[in-house]
Amino acid sequence: MDNIPFTRRLLRTICAQIAREQRDDDIRKTLELFRKMRAEDPVFQFSVDLDEKDQIETLIWASGRSRSNCSCFGNVVTFDTTNSTNLYKMPFGLFVGVNNHFQSSIFARVLMRDEKAESFKWVFKEFLALMGGVQPQTILTDQCKAMEIAINAIMPGITHLWCKWHVFKDARIELGPLYRKNAAFQDEFHKVITEMYTVDEFENAWGQMVEKYGLKDHHYMVKAYDKRKKWAKAYNKGKFCARMTSTQRSESANHMLKGVVPRNSSMNRFVEI
């Protein structure tokens, strides 16, 4: 047998070809799995967005039970994405709500190629279609700008709130030692966000706090204040939230999934779990 020069370029070409073949086979198996799931559950629905090469860009699916639960309890939903849960490093997202016993209920699952505004627009549009076109009253997310753009475009009039946990997390990062090591400031910051019941109370408390700690012109505090209607309790009285103030339910479900699904699972294996 003749010796064939095995260059790095040739190796990359072979690996790329194998990856393409595996991906194509994975997509075929995933769509076959969806057809099987629909045969077993006639109300199961899925929607897929393909690119010009027939590769999956975005994928959303929901069982009949999930759709039924959403029709009953979908007035408030949380949506959160997590990365590195599958072979292709596609962000995975969950729409989650609570039932009448305040137990978490997954409404729909999503795989995305990226987290750009156009991708989120497709996700939210298809989520509404899967749920009979009924728009939730309230949605809770993190502070992703692309997500905010998509929500404003696809769900006009919805109450869009930020997860308070992410607000506190960002404060910890942006304010550094003042937040992490100053218990008095941290306590005051939390109270302003969660315990001011009127707009006047909030505005007065916020003004006193930024003046007291020299934060009036701090970039994070200015940015947070500009978006205060998305996280300050005083601005959201009367808004139905089903006792949810964070995306913790989505994040908890995502975390549990990571413990069940191998990190580099194929798409069809990931969907099957």
Image (tube, grey):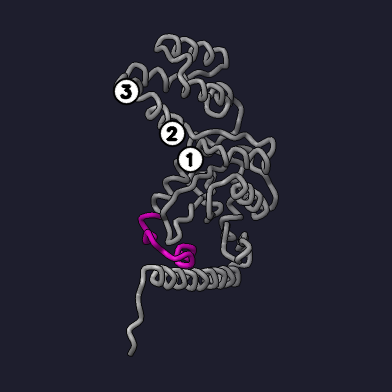
Q: Which mark is residue 177?
A: 3
The percent position of residue 126, horizontal first and vertical second, equals 64, 53
Residue type at mark 3 is Pro
In 3D space, how far apart are the residues under numbered discs 2 and 1 (Cα atoms)?
8 Å
Q: Is residue 6 above or below residue 48?
A: below
The percent position of residue 272, horizontal first and vertical second, equals 47, 66
Q: Quadrant of the C terminus?
A: bottom left
Name the residue that disc number 1 marks: 247
The percent position of residue 77, horizontal first and vertical second, equals 56, 43
* Left or right: 37 as drawn, with respect to 6: right
The percent position of residue 221, horizontal first and vertical second, equals 47, 21
Q: Nearer the viewer, mark 3 or mark 1?
A: 3
Q: Is residue 152 above or below residue 122?
A: above
Residue type at mark 2 is Trp
Specify which label sits upstream in the sequence, 2 or 1: 2
Regarding mark 3 in the picture, which secondary structure is present there?
Answer: helix
Name the residue that disc number 2 marks: 165
Regarding mark 1 in the picture, which secondary structure is present there?
Answer: loop
Q: Which residues are magenta?
A: 258-273
Q: Which mark is residue 230?
A: none
* Left or right: 121 as drawn, with respect to 13: right
In 3D space, how far apart are the residues under numbered discs 3 and 2 (Cα atoms)?
18 Å
